[in-house]
Image (tube, rainbow, N blue to C red):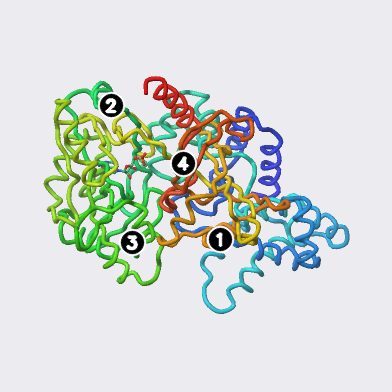
Amino acid sequence: MLYKKLAELYEELDSTSKRLEKTEILSKFFRYLPESDRETLYLLLGNIYPEYSKKKIGISNQLTIKAISKATGINDKEIVKEWKSIGDLGKVGELLTKHKKQSTLASHVLTTQKVLENLRKLPELEGKGTVDKKLSLIVELFTSASPIEAKYLIRTLIGDLRIGIQESTIKEAMASAFFDKDKEAAKELEYAIDKANDLAEVFDIAKKGKLKDLDKISLEVGKPIKVMLAQKVKTIEEGFNALGKPCAIEYKYDGFRLLIHKKGNEVILFTRRLENVTKQFPEVVDYVKKYVEGNSFILDSEAVGFDEKTKIYKPFQSISQRIRRKYDIEKLQKELPVEVNVFDIIYYNSKSLIDEPFEKRNALIKKIVHNQKYKIISAKQIITDSKEKAEDFYKRALKDNQEGIMMKSLKALYKPGRRVGYMLKMKPEERDLDLVIVGAEYGTGKRSGWLSSFILACRDSKTGKFLEIGKMGTGIKEKEEEGMSFHELTEKVKPLIIEEKGKTVKIKPRIVLSITYQEIQKSPNYSSGFALRFPRFTSLRPDRSPNDISTLEEIKKDFSSQKRNYKYG
Ligand code: AMP
């Protein structure tokens, strides 16, 4: 397909902010898109591979500027100046290409295949001369690009498409394109996408119009799936009412979610962001091989840190560095050991278990996981219909340094990617949120040159937009002993700057933080309509994606329950 067609689609999508119109535009496009061009769907979300793939474009603003400069003959400084005044590097590229194209006409016609081919070479390059090779792959695309093609190539490279399309919009558009707005079909499609994590694969089947064939998408060992998510409850009673009695109650471990895939002698570990972290946890690979029975399986678990000497469980933030660290693995493994707590199994010996009830899956875990304390165990659990027993268990979990409890229906199936009410979480009255950094301000005095206050956003799950909810400054300095200072956070955030105006910068929404706060207020100053009072940094959440953060709905709920609490003390 011509890249020009895709660029025109981006423009059309960008021209409206109405979700319904965007869905219509996309749905029309899907009807036109031939199956052989299905991989164009990755580009629609700014990717080059399915969501689960590790391979990302990973090009910095600086390199993009260099490539624009090479392709247009305009020097870097001039481009940066334009960027500062326009605020969108894509538009800068469009403008400069327009000027240039008056003298030299594009030599080739760009296709989406060619764009994918070149972009896919970028993450493969390593070693000497990498930068030059990357540069020439990008310049090759730019020299063939028309102005609007250049605009979207640039935005794709820097990971900021700005067309307001989420995976959910694509799901809806596919349903309406091929199943005539059928609600059931939309649900089936959504489910298939959550299972496959590959829009192109689902598109292929959907285009043929055979809903039944979606069942053929099956789980595969080695291919990550989205995990089932939990809903919140405030009391044990509320949990029993929602799930029925008896139900399973487990510790809610304060660690990070780990999906364990095994086939033959190979073990692969994924986070809930679908990132492969096998290399970071060699000891877990070992535990799985030694202490879990079965030829092939996919386990769902929570890895939790503990103190090597005292054996006391530690909070997530004290072990979070293990997820990202690529060097000194052995040292870190000794210093920050983890225990894997298996709480679900979704595939076993070549058979998917997602349509089996939890009680059956649970029994299988007990059978195949040979508990080894401080290595790998099945999650601490009781099955009860007694409120008193449940409350005792909850208190025990808190005493054991865990976050609270999970309550699970014995009859429920496993729903990948869904926040269904099959699994409920209960924690002490909380005032904490996961938010993403979308902006920052440079400090003054001692902190000048450092970004000192960070603008945080929640997510509107209906539109997928990030909405600002407050500014956070304090809390980070106190965490310095744990390796997080203003200086370090500045270093993390700087490559993600997409716009600068005076002291304020706009940041690509990538970095997720856990924060605590004292109160939520209504506020016209932030796009969410709310402001947090005294937000304080607690930890970085490298295991969470920006799509996983606290939603506006949750914040609204917290806001109203907070009022209720105040009233009733
Ligand atoms: P939250 O992140 O607050 O929405 O709570 C859900 C998370 O709790 C899951 O994604 C898991 O990472 C974690 N978790 C800890 N213990 C368990 C457990 N026993 N069962 C399910 N999830 C658990």
Q: CA distance from mark 4 to mark 2?
A: 23 Å
Q: CA distance from mark 2 to mark 1?
A: 45 Å
How far across and down, in percent of the image, does residue 72 sit? 79, 64
Disc number lying in front (3 or 2): 2
Earlier-in-chain disc, 3 versus 2:
2
Q: CA distance from mark 3 to mark 1?
A: 21 Å
- Vertical placement of 142 versus 241: above or below? below
Q: Secondary structure at mark 4?
A: loop
Name the residue beneath numbered marker 3.
278
Q: CA distance from mark 4 to mark 1?
A: 22 Å
Name the residue beneath numbered marker 4.
549
202 relative to 92 in the view: left or right: left
- At label 3, counting other C-alpha atoms closer than 10 Å, the crowd grade (few under 14, some 14-19, many 20 or more) is some
* Residue at screen point 83% across, 54% down: 98
Earlier-in-chain disc, 2 versus 1:
1
Disc number lying in front (4 or 3): 4
How far across and down, in percent of the image, does residue 143 sit? 74, 63
Query: Which mark, by number, is residue 235?
Result: 2
* Residue at screen point 61% across, 48% down: 439
